[in-house]
């Protein structure tokens, strides 16, 4: 009989925290613990006061923010009215997933741990700090932490002596059952939006708008290393509206050739239709999946076959494999000791799930369709900063997309799913529609008139600032200072003519940094530093807002260091006062960032 009740609650943005939570659930069940796994926002949070044992698995996103599916939990748990004894019956542990190249590494997990202690909970272990930057990924920290966890948990609740731990290779039941139909339904082409969804309200993840693509134009010169596209959609009649700083979410598809390869490897007929039933209550079918649905549609629009698979993919494949050699290898990749090898085979060269399946053909051919949704995560929508304003381009929405492509030691170049898919669509060849919806973004611009803004946006980081400048100019705001950086004026200087016009009209001060037009690199922060007196005067004297957008790697930290040096040298502040000044700008939303990997 199960001897303890364990609850695993996760906050997951990209699926890693969910994957780790599901693994935790399986390991718990192998240890005869009764265990439930739920997303934090699906769990009725007031019930926490009755839970004896909870593991929280939380990712930290962007600038130290919680993932979307734990935002209401986050607001609740920090309510001041909660008594300091609220969770005194609870033993808990917090497993964090983060990236140590960001300043607020695992901020959410650490903050949650402290808060649970404040509310009277007892920590079984220190916070686990999973790190994406580690060579072996977050598992390097998670595996030893889990061992300690099971010791702690099983200490007071030992496995009864007559119950062996069931071996790791035992197959768990699939989340869904998939029933093939004998005949193909004779209805017309499948619409993207499932029947029965609410047609009211603005488009959302539940019901995206199928936006006609108006144009898709390369805006980088022929000798530039990267293909960057300016893409325009027609959103007339969609009910979509947005402001500068908002994001558009786009639901991409797998390429037809990958869908074909996948179906071939698994012996699936793309034209066959099926219905899907959850095996257990509480499990829901993927949003928008129509019933019945064709295999082709499931694979092209739902199953993420082009991403690098996680460890659980190998664990499950090992359980499903009928082939001894393949099974051995897969089992190794799924085990704690095989992680170095898995990293070398899969993570480092960015091998995709589809490529792995092709490497293990006997196993792929034996995957029961019921397990497709356990094996592969769903394709996630991708967010882009909106690059246009409705005031300048009514009924239109524009984005600037850098097409992601790079080489690893594998022969085939690696390609970003969404950007490559978008780049491949050509409205000149016939109508193209893209499922999208908008979300209010990370950046908000001043509502009060006459507040100047300083915007630092090298590369595609300039996108949200074009929307802001268009919007502000339409409202008669002239205090717009833009720092733009790119490699060369004639290769990747986006909207050069537009900026020049606005400068000529006195609506914009543009400062450029062309990094590769001279021996020494010149970056936006060098220009910022040279204009330190102006920056200080605008910020301190005129209450300007400061914005930063672009590549998350080094640029944001470099720009922040430059700002601190301006505060010290132009403002005469000490080191701690300069840091406090920046923190105060952040708190009052006068310093905002939008960065991406
Ligand atoms: P580089 O590629 O020549 O190094 C847009 O990508 C621009 O940002 C390019 O000119 C790029 O220069 C520059 N860039 C690269 N790293 C940067 C950093 N740490 N800070 C600011 N700009 C950077």
Image (cartoon, rainbow, N blue to C red):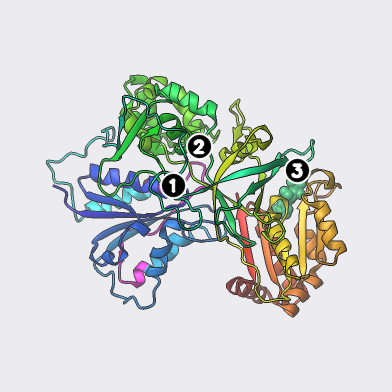
In the image, what residue occupies the spot 77% across and 39% down?
Answer: 224
In this rendering, the answer to whether 75 lies above or below 138 is below
In this rendering, the answer to whether 439 lies above or below 177 is below
How far across and down, in percent of the image, does residue 362 sit? 38, 19
Q: Quadrant of residue 403?
A: top right
Q: Of tags 3 and 1, which is closer to the observer?
A: 3
Q: Give the residue at mark 1.
A: 15
How far across and down, in percent of the image, does residue 219 sit? 75, 43
The tag earlier along the polypeptide, 1 or 2, is 1
The tag earlier along the polypeptide, 2 or 3, is 3
Q: Secondary structure beneath disc 1?
A: loop
Range drawn in magenta: 116-144
Query: Is residue 130 visible to the viewer in this orientation of the structure?
Result: yes
Of 150 and 213, nearer the camera is 213
Q: Give the residue at mark 2.
A: 307
The alpha-carbon separation of the residues under discs 1 and 2 comes to: 12 Å
Q: Secondary structure beneath disc 3?
A: loop
Q: Give the residue at mark 3.
A: 219
Of 95 and 22, nearer the camera is 22
Asked if disc 2 and disc 3 are in contact, CB closer than 8 Å, the reply is no
Image side of residue 141 versus residue 427, left or right: left
Of 95 and 501, nearer the camera is 501
In the image, what residue occupies the spot 18% across and 50% down?
Answer: 158
In this rendering, the answer to whether 258 lies above or below 471 is above
> Is 129 contained in the magenta span?
yes
How far across and down, in percent of the image, does residue 94 sit? 37, 58
> Is 395 contained in the magenta span?
no
């Amino acid at each position: 009989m199960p001897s303890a009740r364990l609850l695993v609650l996760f906050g997951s943005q990209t699926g890693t925290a969910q994957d780790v939570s599901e693994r935790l659930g399986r390991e718990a069940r192998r240890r005869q613990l009764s265990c439930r796994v739920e997303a934090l926002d699906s769990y009725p949070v007031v019930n926490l006061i009755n839970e004896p044992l909870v593991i929280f698995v939380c990712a930290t996103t962007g600038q130290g923010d919680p993932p979307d599916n734990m935002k209401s939990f986050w607001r609740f748990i920090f309510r001041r009215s909660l008594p300091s004894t609220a969770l005194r019956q609870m033993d808990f542990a917090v497993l964090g997933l983060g990236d140590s190249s960001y300043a607020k590494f695992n901020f959410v997990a650490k903050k949650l741990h402290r808060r649970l202690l404040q509310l009277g909970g007892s920590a079984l272990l220190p916070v686990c700090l999973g790190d994406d930057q580690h060579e072996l990924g977050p598992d390097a920290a998670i595996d030893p932490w889990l061992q300690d966890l099971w010791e702690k948990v099983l200490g007071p609740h030992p496995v009864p002596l007559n119950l062996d731990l069931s071996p790791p290779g035992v197959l768990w039941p699939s989340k869904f059952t998939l029933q093939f139909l004998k005949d193909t339904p004779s209805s017309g082409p499948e619409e993207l939006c499932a029947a029965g969804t609410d047609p009211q309200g603005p488009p959302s993840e539940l019901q995206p708008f199928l936006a006609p693509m108006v144009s898709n134009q390369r805006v980088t010169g022929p000798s530039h290393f990267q293909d960057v596209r300016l893409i325009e959609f027609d959103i007339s009649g969609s009910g979509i509206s947005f402001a500068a700083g908002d994001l558009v979410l786009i639901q991409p598809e797998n390429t037809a050739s990958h869908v074909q390869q996948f179906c071939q490897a698994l012996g699936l007929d793309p034209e066959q239709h099926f219905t899907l039933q959850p095996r257990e209550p509480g499990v829901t079918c993927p949003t928008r999946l129509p019933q019945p649905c064709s295999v082709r549609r499931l694979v092209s629009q739902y199953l993420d076959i082009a991403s690098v698979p996680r460890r659980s993919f190998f664990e499950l494949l090992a359980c499903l494999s009928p082939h001894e050699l393949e099974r051995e290898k897969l089992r190794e990749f799924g085990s704690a000791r095989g992680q170095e090898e898995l990293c070398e085979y899969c993570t480092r060269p960015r091998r995709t799930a589809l490529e792995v399946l092709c490497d293990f053909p006997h196993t792929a051919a034996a995957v029961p369709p019921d397990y497709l949704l356990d094996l592969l995560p769903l394709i996630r929508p991708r967010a882009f900063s909106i690059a246009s304003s409705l005031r300048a381009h009514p009924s239109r929405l524009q984005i600037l997309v850098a097409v992601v492509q790079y080489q690893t030691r594998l022969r085939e170049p690696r390609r970003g799913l969404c950007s490559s898919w978008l780049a491949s669509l050509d409205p000149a060849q016939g109508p193209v529609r893209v499922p999208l919806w908008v979300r209010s973004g990370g950046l908000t611009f001043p509502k009060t008139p006459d507040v100047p803004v300083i915007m630092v946006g090298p590369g595609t980081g300039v996108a949200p600032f074009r929307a802001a400048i268009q919007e502000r100019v339409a409202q008669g705001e002239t205090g717009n200072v833009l720092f733009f950086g790119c490699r060369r004026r004639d290769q990747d200087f986006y909207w050069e003519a537009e900026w020049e016009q606005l400068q000529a009209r006195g609506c914009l001060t543009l400062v450029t940094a062309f990094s590769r037009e001279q021996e020494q690199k010149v970056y936006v922060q060098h220009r910022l530093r040279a204009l330190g007196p102006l920056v200080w005067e605008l910020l301190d004297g005129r209450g300007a807002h400061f914005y930063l957008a672009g590549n998350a790697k080094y640029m944001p930290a470099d720009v922040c260091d430059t700002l601190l040096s301006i505060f010290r040298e132009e403002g005469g502040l000490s080191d701690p006062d300069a840091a406090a000044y920046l923190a105060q700008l952040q708190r009052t939303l006068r310093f905002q960032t939008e960065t991406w990997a």
